[in-house]
Structure formats: C-alpha cells, structure tokens
Amino acid sequence: MSNSNRLTGNDPDIKNFPQLYNVLNDEDKEFLLSNHKVKHYAKNEKIYGEGEKPKGLLCLGSGKVKVYKDGIGGREQIVRMVAAPNFIGYRALFAEDVHIASAVAIEDCVIFHIPGNVIFKLMGSNSKVCRNLLKSFAVELGFTRYRTVSLTQKHIRGRLAESLLFLREIYGFKDDGVTLDIQLSREDIANFSNMTTSNAIRTLSTFVNEKVIAVDGRTIKIVDQAKLERISKLG
Amino acid sequence: MSNSNRLTGNDPDIKNFPQLYNVLNDEDKEFLLSNHKVKHYAKNEKIYGEGEKPKGLLCLGSGKVKVYKDGIGGREQIVRMVAAPNFIGYRALFAEDVHIASAVAIEDCVIFHIPGNVIFKLMGSNSKVCRNLLKSFAVELGFTRYRTVSLTQKHIRGRLAESLLFLREIYGFKDDGVTLDIQLSREDIANFSNMTTSNAIRTLSTFVNEKVIAVDGRTIKIVDQAKLERISKLG
DNA sequence: GTAAATTTGTGTTGTACAACATATTTTTCT
DNA sequence: AGAAAAATATGTTGTACAACACAAATTTAC
C-alpha cells in the first residue's frame, strides 16, 4: 500500500488534500482557501451523528475516524474505517438526506469543512472534482457490498481475519513492517467484524496461539499474513 | 438468449431517461442521441458478470434487473434490485475497476449503452449529470449500508419482512394496490434476504398463516402492511 | 404425452455463535 | 494514593438457523 498521499507533520493544510486542491485552477484554489474552515477533533470526539443534517463536505486532513451505524439493541456496526486524506460524511450531502451513520475520531483529527454551496460551485467549474467524488463513492460502495457478503456468509474466524487484513490495507504498518498502525478496543474490532466482544477476544487469542498474530494490549502485529489470508478466504 | 434482434413496437427511448437526457443542453442532447446504443435483454439473460471490464454507462430504460455477488460455496447474495429508469453497472466504471457483481434481467429489458468517453464528455460540459450520478451513488451506498446492518443483525422474520417492504418500495403495487409488481423465485427472495431457500419458503408460509401476506405461486399480496413493518422493525 | 429437471414444501439434526455469568486486569477519576 | 469504572478474559448454556433428507408440485424438454 502506497503512503505517498499520506499527510504528515503537525499542520495539515487543505493544500495537501490532493483529491480536492490539486485538481483546481488558480482562481478556484483561491476561492476554496478563503471558503473553508479547519477544525480540530480530540480522540473520541463525535464528528457527526445519525439524523443530523450535513453542513457541507468534510475532508479528513489528518487522524483516523470510524463511521458506524446503531443497530438492533444498541449493537453498533462499524461500516467504515477512514485514514487521511479522505472525504467523510459526504453521502448525506449528495443524497440530500440526513446522516444515516455517526462518525467519531479514534485519534486526534484535523478536518476541513467546506460549505455545500462552495463544493457545488467548484464542481460546476471543474469536472475533475466530480470525478474524484464519484471515485470515492465507487470505491466505498464496492467495499460496502463486499463486506455485506463476507459479514453475512463468513464464519467468525474468517470475518476477524478479513477485518485485520482490511485494517492493514487502510492504515498500513508501522516502521517495523509488522505492527498495525491503528489501536482499537476489542469492542471496536468486534463491531467492525460483526461479532460479540467476547468472541472477538476469544478468536484473537486463538490467532495468537496459532502464531498468526501477536498481541500486546491494543497493539497487534501480523506474524503470518499468508495464513491470515487463508483463514479469511476459507470463511 | 439473443438480444438486439427483436422488433418491438414502442421501445423506450433515451429521451425518456430523465437522470441523463433532461439535464442536457441541445447540443449535448444531439451528441448523446448519436452516441449510444439501445440493447434488448431477454428474461434471465446476463447483462454483465463479475470480473468483466465495464464497457460504459448502462441505463435501464425498461424492465427489472437483479445485481448479485457470488459468495461462499456459490451462495449468491442479491445486493440490489433495480427498476427503470436507473443507472446500472456504473460503480466499476467510476472506480476504474472490473465489475464486482453480476447483473441479470429478471424480465425483458431495454438498456441504453453509453461509451465511457461519451459520458465523461457530458460530465465535463454539464455538472448536473455529475450531480445525478453522485445522487445515485449516495442513495445506493445508503441502502447498502442499511442492509449490511439488518442482514447481519435482524432475525429471519425481520429480514424477510424487510425484503418484502423493499420490493414494494422499489417496484410498487399492481393496480389492485396490494399485489407486488414483481415475480421472484423463492430462491431469489432467499438470496435477497440472506437466508436459505428452505427458510424463505417456511417463513413466507408462516406469514401467510398470520394473514400478513397472501401468496399464489410467485405472486405476493401484502395483506397487512402495518404488521409487516412491525415484524421488520422488531428484527 | 411422458420423462426429466426444477421449484416448492416440510420435517429432523447438528452446530456456530449469541447470551449470560463471573473473574481479572487496566484505566479513569477524585 | 485508593475507589470506581471500564476493558479484557474465559467458561457455560441456549437457540436460531444452516444443512440435510425427502416428498410433492410445477415447469421444461423431447
């Protein structure tokens, strides 16, 4: 996984948000620079909630976000794990609908807020903006459909293995090349994998015993990726 | 299983495809009219399959289509039921990816084929085309996310009730106001509701006994919609 | 028209996993 | 620091539903 787009440093700037800024002409760049807000979110802070009206387009400049839906009996289902730079909360904006999921910062985040009329104006004068938004949708719809099938058809081991592989794909490894660059509670892992917290804990333990992963608190190392892929594939 | 060789009196026309034609200026209308193909598909004919490269944008002008993914052990999961007029197979086009699902005509269909470069040119000169495509994506992503949660968390009765309500929403009723305007095999209903065919048959029977629906072969009447909604909601 | 194939229907068995209980460890709060 | 709360861990029980088996009805094939 390439990290060439990944934002680094302490001061994210919308100029480093390639999906949007890089494709604009000079005039539109100027317009965007003077028509957006930069907001900071602390770890565990809510970004938006189910039922709220979208205020505009949100661009995750730095940090990590989980997007989830509240299900039956309060059981939350994580439908998306987001790394920067990426659009968030844009489905509701383009569906002209309220948010049907909630977003929470899972570590400190910087998010660029762009009012609806501003992004629509940019879309009018620059079709590459549209293309990038369409591409985001297309990738996400593909992911969500894929997940619908595996979360309903795969067994627990397969679902958990797949989730770990997706976390690796989304967030990558730390410098050592084996440690997942994301810290999640067992509950979050369970909610991402459609299982109870108990079963997530249990199954992670068996993976450790089988030397597929190594775990230290919330730090997860992928020890045998080929085996993990086999477990994911076999269901 | 042959297409484009059937003579039909009154074919649907791309002029009646509002998401695309109505928003164009005269010049672009002319361009679109001379740069698309009208194709016929017979009932049960495959429109595209998993792994194929998208040839362009498909617009369902008339007929009904199911979109499904092949899951574990050949168990197919229907991820979308489509009524005209609607875009189909566009995810792969905008993700610059191969199709990750298959589409089959569940009754005779007319589909407008628009080459990729043509739709991209129209998007460049008319941002309303983009808006309509974005809206399609947004609605579909919302549906798919909603379904992920209910297909994984609701019990069989709730899943089947929800599926019947979605079929009503998508295809509506016949003139009598109670008969679903769609004929599906029990297997298709099962694959849309994430359950075995046996359980779909069984549960439909109990719904009949409970006077929630009435069934005659593949014809389904919704007798007590409020009750069906209650069953769907309670999971 | 009859045979073959497919779809529909129903009962039985087995099991994957949720639900629950409870202990232990870690984190948060004052 | 110690108390309270939350997260992690593990064993037990119950059940929803898949898997299987088989019969009847319907459709397709020849």
Image: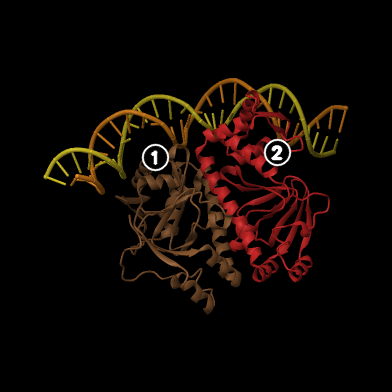
Chain colours: A red, B brown, C yellow, D orange
Q: Name the amino acid, label 1.
A: Asn
Q: Chain of mark 1?
A: B
Q: Is residue A8 left or right of residue A52?
A: right
Q: Is A48 placed above or below D4 here?
A: below
Q: Which mark is residue A197?
A: none
- Kindly tell me whether residue A230 is visible in this rendering: yes
Q: Quadrant of the N terminus of chain A?
A: top right
- Helix, strand or loop for disc 2: loop
Label 2 environment density (alpha carbons within 10 Å; few <14, some 14–19, many ≥20): few
Q: Name the amino acid, label 2.
A: Leu
- Helix, strand or loop for disc 1: helix
Q: Chain of mark 2?
A: A
- In the current view of this chain or complex, which residue is farthest to the bottom? B26
Q: Report x, y in % for residue A227.
A: 60, 30
Q: Is residue A14 left or right of residue B162?
A: right
Q: Residue at position x 65%, y 71% from top?
A: A124
Q: Nearer the viewer, residue A191 or B77?
A: B77
Q: Quarter of the image holding residue A162?
A: top right
Q: Residue at position x 67%, y 29% from top?
A: A223
Residue pointed to by mark 1: B199
Q: Is B169 placed above or below C1 here?
A: below
Q: Residue at position x 50%, y 56% from top?
A: B54
Residue pointed to by mark 2: A184
